[in-house]
Each structure stands twice: as structure tokens, then as C-alpha cells.
Amino acid sequence: MSGRGLLMWDEAVTKYDFGSSHPMDPVRLALTMGLVRAYGLDRAMDVVAAKPAGDSTLRLVHREDYVAAVRAASEDPAHADQSYGLGTVDDPAFAGMHEASALIAGQSVGAAEAVWRGNAAHAVNFAGGLHHAMPGAASGFCIYNDASLAIARLLELGAERVAYVDVDVHHGDGVQAAFWDDPRVLTISLHEHPRTLFPQTGWPEETGGTGAAEGSAVNVALPAGTGDEGWLRAFHAVVPELLAGFRPQVLVSQHGADTHFEDPLAHLAVSLDAQRAVQEACHELAHAHADGKWVALGGGGYEVVDVVPRSWTHLVGIAAHQAVDPESVIPSTWRDEVYARTRQLGPARMTDGRWPVRLRSWEDGYDPADRLDQAILATRRAVFPLRGLLA
């Protein structure tokens, strides 16, 4: 296995653009790559552009009629078929939509192939993580579900156990749906409670299909307002034990940056420093339980200057085994780029001032009256016995 990590990047992924009034501004991708370069991380990894996902690959997850509908909307956005979730407020149709979406999907599939074949220890596609797209519909800013496609490709290549860990503020509903009845895939999602946030799914009682697939879906529904300590407590109270029992051959993780307290579309209160801590934890868990095979994806994140580029640059640095010091001063060349592109002032450091973040371990005891601890307990009681673990 190559000791170098793989960074999937093609400038054309920034053509995944729903328009100037849409919160998913592709400048977040361009600024992330700019910050990666400013720290020299592009020299610490092999930067590769994979081919767009072809129809046969897309059909590993998506229905043929849906792919055809995306193609049609891509060619004629004004007549997008809304019965497929296209041409809506969340997912406006745009010219070239199919090509841009297939390109992002291709990067995640290429990352999975490289890690499985041993061509790279870790691979990152921060343009990916579009976890809401369903087999037959667009949803939540997502056209093709690159995370599901990467996992499906791993299964096609012979993987027998793939773990998917999703720490986006929104429930990873599309990935859960794709593998609901497949015991080879363990999906774990930590997200804001469905009572207060789209897509209103991801209850702890959602534990997978019947038979062998029962217990293959895990959902931690966090109370709105959960901050660093609670978010990290929930992660460490659920994820490591499940991965240790499942023994995945590959870990695929989704690192949406919209858990951040500055994100305009959600209600958690997590800092950049806690996001970095979870990225490090996923890296360590991949080495502990998946022979180091780790595919890391981006996801949501709508504070596109202050949060997303810093969060995903930390992710790239960790995957490159050249973690960026949270206290480091961000190069002025990148801050100049931020101003040139957005007319905003970029952040000065790679921290929110909370590093190192505090962890309150689940093993130290829990408070049955605490809402966060109640959420953790609900998940453990729903799924741990199904996996032969003590709740």
C-alpha cells in the first residue's frame, strides 16, 4: 500500500452550482483547495482527477429512469421533472447538472477503488458527501449520492463489511436508504434531532431492515444547541464500540461542516476544533479497525468562507499525515484569495480558540436527566443489543 494519501480534485467540480441565491456556493470548494495549497498539503498527497461516474456506475444506486431525468434536466433546465425532485427550490436544475454531479460521484468512486486496491492508504474527496440523494430522486442539494456509490463500488469489488460514519448536521438518509437491507454495510449517523431539522428522519428507532440487516443502521439524534463536549461525547459513546464489533474492511466517513455554530441552516453549536477532533478520531478508528483503509468525504457546510475551507483543510492534513496546527496563522496569500473571490475577510487562524477540546467520557457515568445523555441512551438501547453489545 502506498504511504501517501490521495486527494481527489478536478476544478470542474465547482460547476456543481445551483445559482447565486443558493446556499451551496461552490466557492467553498475553490477556497478549500486554495487553503490546501497554501499549506502545501497538495504536495504531501497525490492529487488525482478521476473520470465522471458512467451510467453503469450510477445504476449501482440510482434508477435508470432517474439518471435519464437528470440528463434531460441538465440539457433543458426549464423543463426539469419535479416528480424526481429536480427543478425545486432545494435542487434547482442547471445546465450541465448531470456532468458536474457525475464528476463529483466519480471522484468518490475513484477514491474508494484506490483505497480498496491498496494504491493509497487514505483518500479524500471534499467535494463529495452528497448524502441525501435517493435512488430515484434528488433531495437536499444532492443529485447523485456519491457516498452510496462509493460504498456500492466497494461491495462490487468484493468488500464484505463497509462502515459509513456520517457527522453532518443533517441525517444521512440517502445512504441509510440505499443499504437499509444490506447487512454488509453499517451506517452510523450523528445529526441534529429530526424534530428540528431536515430531513426529519434519523430517529434512534431506525435500525435497519429485517433479518441479518436488523441493527445495520444507527442514528444518534442530538438536541438542538449541542456543542463541542456533547457532540464529542455522543461520537465516542457510540461509534468506536460499534466499529470494533463490526470490524469493517473499509471506513467511509462524511464530514459535513454544517454542525458549526456559525452555520446558517442548522442549530448545533460545534466548533472547528471539535470537527478536527472527530476527523482525527475517524483516522485513528480506520487504523484500529479497518487496516487503515479510509475514504473521507465532505458534505454540507454553508458558512463558506470562515468554516468550510478550514474544516476540510484540517481533514486533508490529517489524511496526509501532516495535520495542520490549529494555532497556525493562515497564509496571507489565501486570505487575499478570499477577499478577491468574495470581498470578505478570511479567518486568521486554523482554530476557533477551543483546542484542545474537552472530552467527557461515557464510561465516567451518565446523567439520566440530561437531554444529550438521553439521546445517547436511546441509540444504544435501540441498536446495541441487535449487534450483541451491552446498551
Image (tube, rainbow, N blue to C red):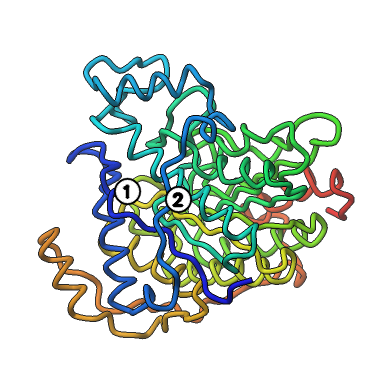
Residue 315: percent from left, percent from top:
46, 68
Comparing 109 with 199, the one in front is 109
Pick the quarter of the image with the N terminus: bottom right
Q: Is residue 189 visible?
A: yes
Q: Is residue 286 left or right of residue 334?
A: right
Which of the 4 image quarters holds residue 336? bottom left
Q: Is residue 215 above or below residue 11?
A: above
Residue at position x 64%, y 59% in the image: 117
**Secondary structure at numbered mark 2:** helix
Q: Which amino acid does label 1 sit on?
A: Val
Comparing 273 with 126, the one in front is 126
- Total numbered labels: 2
Residue at position x 53%, y 28% in the image: 62
Residue 259 - label: none
Comparing 50 with 189, the one in front is 50
Q: Is residue 19 left or right of residue 176?
A: left
Mark 1 burial class by Cα count in 10 Å: few <14, some 14-19, many 20+ = many
Q: What residue type is labelled 2?
A: Gln
Q: Can residue 351 be seen in this view?
A: no
Q: Is residue 205 left or right of residue 120?
A: right
Residue 161: percent from left, percent from top:
75, 50
Residue at position x 85%, y 36% in the image: 212
**Secondary structure at numbered mark 1:** helix
Residue 13 - label: 1
Residue 318: percent from left, percent from top:
50, 74
Label 1 close to label 2 by CB (< 8 Å): yes
The residue that disc 2 covers is 107
